[in-house]
Structures are given as structure tokens and as C-alpha cells.
Image: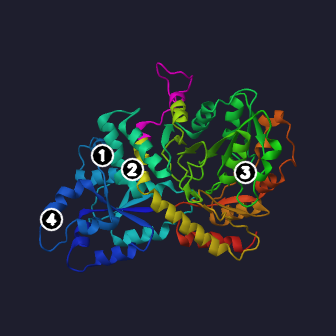
Amino acid sequence: MLNIVLDNEIVLGLLSKSSNDTQHCFVRLQKSPIRFWLPCCLLSFLETQLRSANYHPLTHLLHNQEVELLSSLAAHWHEIPANCTNKTQALMSLDAAILPGATIIWTADPNFVSIHPDIEWGDHEFVYSMLAQYEDEPLLVDLVSQQLQLRPSLEKHIFNVFKHGQYLAGKEVKQLEQELSAYVGASHCVTTANSTDALLIALMAIEVQAGNEVIISPFNTMATAEMVALLGAKPVFVDIDPDTYNLNPQQLEAVINHKTKAIIASNLYGQCADFNSINDIAKQHGLVVIEDATQSFGATYHGLKSGQLATISYTSFAPFQTLGTYGEGGACFTNDDPLAARIQQLQQHQENNTLIGINSHLNTLQASLLLAKLAVFPTELENRLKIAQTYNQLLAEVSSVKIPQIASYNTSVYTHYTIAVTNRKRLQQKLQQRDNIPSAMYYSTPLHLQPVFAYLRYQLGFFPVTEQASQQVLNLPMHPYLLEEMQTQIVTLIKSGW
């Protein structure tokens, strides 16, 4: 994304009621992936100028986010040299430099003063030349576009926390927990410092301990099995469904015994496991089910939101998840009141606790950022679905590619757009070398073949579906701001063979 910061004369030209070249240039530039910014340090000057009947009001530019306001930082004023001839322009250049990505200033002043080495400036011809040089590179997960889209709201939430100064257990944490509970449809939400802590707390809440066994999929993150082992229990693996890559309920009965305490069902790539089947089997054997909603937050199963499909559910708010902080974060969900009370005790150190727990808090700043992001979360999920549908259409006739298979009872949030191919490494190299297109492969070594779990004595061949998936799945770029032109470029390259 290219950022263009508008100088005062450019703004006046855009707001003029008389047609002019600046307006024609603006219309042309809007067809490109550009974000336009109006520096707040110019507002008082512009308001004076715009009192004339010859101009539209500022809202004419600011509506529909065609142009966004760029905050001015107090610290930048102190960085301006004393001998600077135009302090306002100098301040503009420093404020422009805090935007992520490439940023330039569009100005009609041939003597513009930029004091930041990274910020260039010029007229519309300069802007066109920069645009011609600038290429929007594909990103596996694009956090920059999201940040720019939400910047005013993010700033407001951050400075509200700075104002009250309650960086731990601030009001935003409780507000977030209430809004997350309402969104998921669960009675209780307890936020944590990260998703690994959330899983550990969930396991402790149901009293998993040494000698117990916990069933999980080997096509999974290390943390899932590690937290089971950390409590002295034994991870027991079952194979996955070949289409959804989630735990296969048909494999459960064969491994359940008197030591089995719980089942952790992880929802991969954006859709949920078959919880009706899993919960029925668990109920028959008196087991607890834990839903790992890390990759499915926002998805539905038989019309129910992920996060309320088991006795306890947990999720991650890592930056690359569908709803992510700019750091780490997690949460536990449950509809069980006594269990919620145990989770709350385990999540914090307090006097009069009856349980020994851990100190795992989501800090207030991260909670405030999640509140800002939660407001646009439904729109981002809609965008993800449209992008996935475009991928599906473009890849429909490519026989060498298996596109995501979404179960009829599921909706997917497409945390990842995951295809399956043979010769995966060759395709990945081609994408990277030809057009610098990133891709990723997760779980290339299944858990049962990880050195740290060698003591469990699993061998190659024990879980054939998992082992095949680990050699074939590949995640293509997927985020709510991915352009269709970029998808076409990616798929065209795939269609050309590898």
C-alpha cells in the first residue's frame, strides 16, 4: 500500500468547487492501491481558507474514508531544527514517516521542506512517477493495510488507556470479555496472555494430571501436545479427516481407555471439527472435550459460533489470526458456571484462592486494540469469504490442486487458504522465485514424528492421512485486504505448471 500525504494547496484544489487538474489527478490515483492522508497539523490553516464559498467543507474529502486524518505527534515538534524555515512542512514530513509502507507527500510547493530522509515530495508528475515504480508485493498476511484502515480508531483506543493508566486489568479488558462472550454466544470469557496459557488453564481446570491421557490430532501445533505433557499426562494421537484436516471422530473409540481424561479437537484452517460426533463419544465415556478455536474464531458449526462447541473452548489473538492483537493474547470460553470460576482462579494469583494457578493476563493496551478490531471483524470475515470464493473459482479447473473442502455443516473463516498438491516444494519455489509470492507450510513434521515426543514410540506410517497432508498442504496468501488482481497473478502462475 502506497501512502500519499496531501499538502495544503493540494487539499484546497481537491475541495475547490471549480474543476481543476488536481481533482482529475486524484480520480486517476484512486484507481490504484493508494491511501490518502490529511495531516492534522494543517487543519487550522485549512479551516480558515475553506470559509470561502468557493470550497466544499473538509467532510467532502473525509467521508467514506477517501482521505484519512494523519495524527501529529508532540515529540516530532522537538525534532525540528531551530533554523528550519517552514516548521509546519517539517512537521508534516516527520508525521508522514510514522506510516508503515512507502510514503510520499503530494505538494504544489517547489520549495517544500522535508526533514525526514525517507520522505520524498513533489507535484502530480512526481506522484505518477513514484506510482509507476511502486509495486504492491503480495503478503501472506497483511497487517499493514488493516492498521492503516483502522488507524484513527486504534489511536483513540490506545490514548484512552494512556489517559486512565490502568495497563493491567483496565476497564477495556472486562469490556472485551463481555463483547467476546456475546459474539461467541458463551456465558463466560476469561482472557489470557496467550493461547498456550489458555490451553494450559483449560487442562488444569478439568484436573488433567500425571497418569491421564489426552487425545489430540498429530496434525497440530507443538503447544497442544506440550501442554498435555507439561502436566505429566500422555498425548495420544488419532488421525485426521482427509478433507477438513480436523480430528477424525471415527478414530476415537480405538484409543479411549480408563486413563483417558479429555479430547482436544483443534479446528484447522478456518473450519470446525465434527463436534456433534466428538461430544457424543466423549459423553458415552465420561470425557471432557476442549475446543481449540485458534484458527476458527468467527466460524460456525451447525449454525453455532466456534467458541461454544465444547465444555471449554480456547482461542488465540496472535497477530496472524482472524482477530489478532499486535502482540499475544488468548481467551477461554465456557457455559459452565463452576468451571468458569475455576478458570478465573487459575488465571491469576489472588489471596483466598483455593487453586494454584498461573499469572496470565491480557494487558489493557492489547484489549483496547482488540475492541477496535472487533468493530470491523464481521466485515473482514465477509472479505475473507469473497477472497476464498475467488480462489475457488480460479482454481476450479486445475486438476493438480485440491482446494479447501468445507463440510456442509460448517462455515469457514479461512484463517488460511490451504491447497494440497504433490511436488509442494517445487511449487513453493516457483511462486517465490518467479513473482516473489510467499506461501507457507505448517505441520510439515507431524507431532508423532517430532523428536520431543519420541518417548511415545509412534513411528512413520502410524497416521497415514496426517503424514500425507504434512507433505502436500500449502497456504497461499490470505487476508481481508488481498486484491483480486493479486489472486489472479498467483493462480496464473500455478496454472502454468511446476
Residue drawn at the location 72% of the way across and 55% of the way down:
245
Question: Disc 1 vs disc 3: Cβ atoms closer than 8 Å?
Answer: no
Left/right placement of residue 269 relative to residue 121 reads right
98 inside magenta stretch: no
Q: Secondary structure at mark 1?
A: loop
For the view shown, which residue lies furthest in the front direction? 284
Region in magenta: 344-366
Residue drawn at the location 35% of the way across and 76% of the way down:
27
Question: Disc 2 vs disc 1: Cβ atoms closer than 8 Å?
Answer: yes
Left/right placement of residue 109 relative to residue 431 reads left
Residue bearing the label numbered 2: 98
- On the image, which quarter does residue 16 sit in? bottom left
Residue bearing the label numbered 3: 247
Residue bearing the label numbered 1: 73
Q: Secondary structure at mark 3?
A: loop
- x, y (%) of residue 439? 65, 58
Q: Residues within 10 Å of mark 2 (few under 14, many from 20)?
A: few
Picture quarter with the C terminus = bottom right
